[in-house]
Amino acid sequence: MSFEILVPELPESVSDATLVSWHKQPGDWVDKDDNLVDLETDKVVLEVPAPVSGILSKILKTNGSTVIGGDLLALLEEKEKPEKAPAESMQISETHVDDIPLSPAVRRLIQENQLDPSAILGSGKHGRILKSDVLEYLEKQAGSTEKTKGEEKAKETTKTEQKKSPQPSTAVSSLRPEQRVPMTRLRAKIAERLLQAQQNAAMLTTFNEVNMQAVIDLRHQYKARFEQKHEVKLGFMSFFVKASIEALRRFPAINASIDDNDIIYHGYYDIGIAVTTPRGLIVPVLRDADQLDFAGIEKCIAEYGNKAREGSLSVDDLTGGTFTITNGGIFGSMLSTPILNPPQCAILGMHAIKERPVVEDGEIVIRPIMYLALSYDHRLVDGKEAVQFLGTIKECLEAPAHLLLNI
């Protein structure tokens, strides 16, 4: 019996998808629920599983094709699984790779480099193999080979240079390689949304600085007990989420958005946390963040981080949000002006913590200082509100008791 492999129904906010790669070829055996093909949307990568076991008889859409929900991708002939030939036990096949739960990006990397996944030590949850694990494995494997090749090449180069006369420097400068590649759907969507934010909002940025000493001391005092009890590390982001929620309560306009000529005031706090992935910048959302304690926030952030590395974030994880926090400090950024995440009207930028001289009680002292930036839509938020909002965050972070005692 022949089964049609169709593009699954796409999320409401996604109109089409790009076929990234087939994991099976015509004539290959397919087990039920094996991932046949990856489809890349503006937000996530979708997997299309096999409905039954059988032989993939025909592929109708090739890599790079643009597809919509319901499009016919391939035909699958349902059959009973044949007995394995003796030789199959002696080699690594695609079926062996698919037997291990892997994200699309990891599976593609393993198949392209013809690796045995059982030889790779996974650092993810329950030993799951992450993309970083595969890259580290490849780097180690290539290390000895590259060293040997490099030594041989150096010897050959030396011999050649001894025989030839010196060449003019223009010969080297003439090597100007270029590579033209199409934008990924995610990168194209990021570009579209950033341009939309620049064109459709009256965007301004206000700055402040915060003395992080109190937060650092609090983390240092309780981080071991916190991790032991909650099985998650106590990071800085939970403090910033809590401080942002307190500031949003005081200044509800910053938790609002504009819809045509209407202002929508949100009575909930869905905080987006900007995350950098190999595919680009994405913003998973902590829903009802005001209902979470510090441990709950840290656990959600850690879970989203693992999903982002594995490429397993869903559309629901990335949908919505009333306010966004982005941390350029992890890359060493001293100061920046973050761009709005439409239709939100504000975004908070965190930066690197640096020891700086400050004046306290008439004396110059050294303190760990972080610069904060709040970009906001001036159509909805006045400068006074933006400055006071950032001042509230500074107040909460410099005296964390405000967050703990709700005062």
Image (spheres, rainbow, N blue to C red):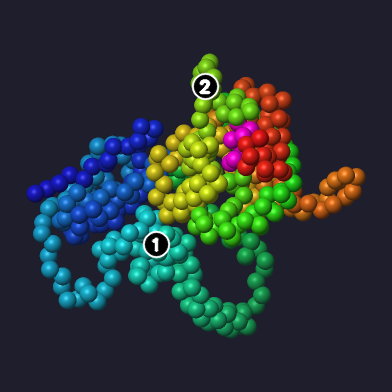
What x and y, as percent, mark residue 370? 71, 47
Would residue 5 appear left or right of 234 to someone viewing this image? Answer: left
Q: Which residue is mark 1?
A: 126
Of all residues, the one furthest to the front in this rendering is 405
Q: Residues within 10 Å of mark 2 (few under 14, many from 20)?
A: few
Earlier in the chain: of badge 1 and badge 2, it is: 1
What x and y, as percent, mark residue 281? 52, 45
At 13% across and 52% down in the image, what residue appears?
77
| Residue depth check, mark 1 versus mark 2: number of the one nearer the observer | 1
Q: Secondary structure at mark 2?
A: strand
Q: Residues within 10 Å of mark 1 (few under 14, many from 20)?
A: few
Would residue 365 appear left or right of 83 to someone viewing this image? Answer: right
**Magenta: predominant secondary structure element?**
helix
Inter-mark Cα distance, 1 to 2:
42 Å
Would residue 13 appear left or right of 388 to someone viewing this image? Answer: left
Q: Which quadrant is home to the C terminus? A: top right
Magenta segment:
241-248
At 53% across and 44% down in the image, what residue appears?
293
Q: Is residue 290 visible?
A: yes
Queried whether the magenta region covers residue 244, the answer comes back as yes
Q: Nearer the viewer, residue 177 or 49?
A: 49
Compared with 348, 136 (above or below) is: below
Q: Which residue is mark 2?
A: 264
Of all residues, the one furthest to the top in this rendering is 261
